[in-house]
Image (cartoon, rainbow, N blue to C red):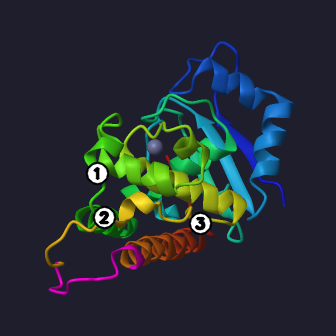
């Protein structure tokens, strides 16, 4: 079902922006713009509210107990999200994708999901630490983690090589999964097969280097799918947003 979208706060033309850009406001006031967001977010039952108010901008919500303002808005059978601004690391217009990317940020800022994010960082570092991603591959990017994600990520930000920071990949993956229902990596590139040598943290030296790289990458992929699914399930009936 297409997402249900509602508004709270001050949306008249003379109101201050309160953390939204003029482009965002124009989009949210256009039937076409709203329709596109609504139709893109249709895999789950979304209930989305855009609030534009001085006193509520920059609030973070993780659970209905955080607020009385939105009590009437919450629908127990839906994924309830409140947006109170569009101020993120990325200066980007409000598309359905960006909305889901920002939901992921919001969830990770809550205590429960922080561990998930930390687990993701650790698994990523294990891949990097274990395999010799030769420096010439990533010098231009200045970062081997970005290089890794540009090699295995399928989403546009990876194809176009414009992750703002390497670990933004987590939120891009969440957006992809919640919108499309799919999340998978590209096969590991051959360049990952050069084993850095020595012995692994767990004391086991691998002889089939490339298979093991693929194993670690598959493990990261499975891990992300399972935590994205968990994050989505926990959104139902609660209130989330920022
Ligand atoms: Zn982000």
Badge 2 local density, few (<14 within 10 Å), some, or many (20+)?
A: some
- Can you identify the residue that label 3 sits on? 184
Classify mark 3: residues with Cα within 10 Å, few (<14), some (14-19) or many (20+): some
The picture places residue 110, in percent across and down from the top left corner, at: 38, 60
User: Magenta segment range?
Assistant: 201-211
Q: Which residue is mark 2?
A: 194
Q: Relative to 144, is 56 on the left or the right?
A: right
* Secondary structure state at the residue bearing disc 2: loop
Question: In this picture, is 105 found above or below 162?
Answer: below
Instruction: Indicate which disc, 1 or 2, sits on the residue closer to the N terminus.
Output: 1
**SS category of the residue bearing label 3:** loop
Residue found at x 81% / y 27%: 30
Residue 176 in view of the camera = yes
Which residue bears the numbered disc 1? Answer: 134
Task: Give the prevailing secondary structure in the magenta stretch.
Answer: loop
Residue occupying image coordinates x 38% and y 72%: 213
Q: Residue at x 42, y 35 (%)?
A: 89
């Amino acid at each position: 079902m297409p997402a249900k979208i509602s508004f709270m706060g001050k949306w008249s033309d003379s109101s201050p922006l309160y953390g939204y850009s003029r482009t965002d406001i124009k989009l949210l006031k256009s039937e076409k713009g709203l329709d596109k967001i609504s139709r893109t977010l249709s895999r789950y039952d979304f209930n989305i509210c855009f609030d534009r108010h001085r006193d509520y901008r920059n609030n973070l919500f993780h659970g209905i107990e955080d607020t009385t303002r939105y009590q009437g808005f919450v629908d127990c059978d839906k994924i309830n999200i409140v947006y109170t601004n569009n101020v993120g690391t990325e200066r980007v217009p409000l598309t359905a994708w960006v909305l889901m990317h920002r939901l992921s940020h919001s969830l990770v800022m809550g205590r429960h999901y922080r561990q998930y994010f930390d687990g993701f960082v650790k698994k990523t570092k294990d891949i990097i630490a274990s395999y010799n991603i030769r420096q010439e591959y990533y010098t231009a990017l200045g970062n081997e983690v970005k290089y890794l994600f540009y090699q295995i990520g399928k989403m546009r930000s990876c194809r176009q090589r414009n992750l703002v920071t390497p670990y933004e990949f987590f939120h891009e993956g969440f957006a992809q999964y919640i919108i499309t229902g799919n999340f998978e990596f590209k096969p590991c590139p051959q360049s990952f097969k050069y084993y850095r040598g020595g012995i692994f943290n767990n004391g086991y030296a691998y002889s089939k280097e490339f298979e093991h790289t693929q194993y670690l990458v598959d493990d990261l992929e499975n891990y992300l799918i399972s935590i994205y699914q968990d994050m989505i399930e926990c959104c139902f009936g609660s209130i989330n947003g920022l």
